[in-house]
Image (tube, grey):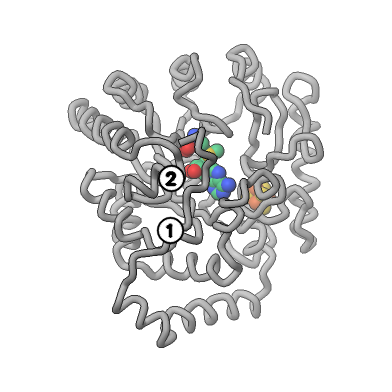
Amino acid sequence: MDQADLPFERFESLLAAHPHVEHVELQGEGESLLHPRFFDMVRALRTKNIKVSIITNGSLISESHAAQLVALGIEKVSVSMESAESETFRQIRGGKLEKVIAGLSALVAEKNKQKSLRPIVGLSITVLRDTQDHLPGIIALYKKLGLDGGVTFQPLSTMPLYEKNYPAGLRQQVLSDHEVDDLWVRVRMHKELRQIQKRKDKLRVDSFYDELLAGFQPGTRRCPWLEQGLYVNHNGIATACCMIKDTERFRLGVIGEDTPQQILDRRKALVTELANGVLPAPCTGCELGRFALMNRWQLFAFAMGGVLRRYSPRAIWRRLRPQKPKVRLPLLPPSAS
Ligand SMILES: C[S@@+](CC[C@H](N)C(=O)[O-])C[C@H]1O[C@@H](n2cnc3c(N)ncnc32)[C@H](O)[C@@H]1O
Ligand code: SF4
């Protein structure tokens, strides 16, 4: 995928073209905090009273960055990780977990110093086949650092443009359909995660994705991201959401070339397609789209299958005698680590 910084002028024209934007998530294929004008963008948005959230790899949260992130009053900083074990983290991400922990600690310390509730600070977990059992370590780290923004999950994507670019090692890390279903059931039923979520909800600070997902109901043939969101990449190309990366085939338009109405009309056509029970082509492989289109029996089979597998003798035996997960990493070519 083509990567570059979003030019600041394009960012400004985007804001001018869509004055009713309420919340902006500054993220993309790269790392937001590497953008040379990242804080100018945040400042421009906050001046207009637009809410801001970010997902970051967390490796660049220096004390000065932490101070600005808190002072600018952004809603949420979510830090990505797949494992809270240094070696697994390094094998997957090619960076140092200790650096990310230092960044998270700096952010929590700065919030305390400025006596600020914002940003709430959480973790975004992409689940790989070999890290499915890493949840306890992640929860322990979340608690140890005193985080408050919750823990969100997504399985390693199987959307075509993602999978096409996976190196062989990463392709083996894609979860099976049952593993994906089990992940959702496990997350939903996990006592500690439920407590974490409850405490987060009490803070009444919603991230970009909290707001987008609010009210999502499986089986309703509706996707709130499609109805309310828009993803714009560095070239100004708009797609329905951040997971739709095939901008050649699935663009809704280009900011500055197409009118905001043309872009929104094309998005509306996808909303209608989904409402008619057809998964729009750009959404192939999306979990939200899958749940949106499930009928009552499929939802029942999903829930029962997950519960039955969770309480099968084999699963109970595994939980009683936890084994260290077999890690078939590294995933990255040697030069990247
Ligand atoms: C666009 S990325 C943000 C990139 C940012 N540099 C980071 O590491 O958080 C948004 C989220 O998607 C996750 N992600 C990246 N590639 C993915 C994939 N192939 N499947 C599922 N999630 C993925 C990232 O870990 C991150 O939590
Ligand atoms: S169905 Fe999935 S891919 Fe399509 S807009 Fe919704 S979240 Fe994005």
Q: Residue furthest top?
A: 9
Disc 2 element = helix
Q: Quadrant of the C terminus?
A: top left
Q: Position of residue 8 (x, y in %)?
A: 58, 14
Q: Which residue is drawn at 49% across and 27% down?
A: 32
Can residue 227 be seen by looking at this rendering? no
Based on the displayed image, in which of its 4 quarters is residue 110 positioned? top left
Q: Where is residue 249 in the image (x, y as percent from the top left)?
A: 81, 39
Q: Residue at x 60, y 29 (%)?
A: 20
Q: Quadrant of the N terminus?
A: top right
Q: Which residue is drawn at 23% across and 43% down?
A: 145
> Which residue is labeled 1 in the image?
327
Q: Residue at x 24, y 51 (%)?
A: 143
Q: Is residue 28 left or right of residue 279?
A: left
Q: Is residue 100 left or right of residue 132?
A: left
**Which disc, if any, is residue 91?**
2
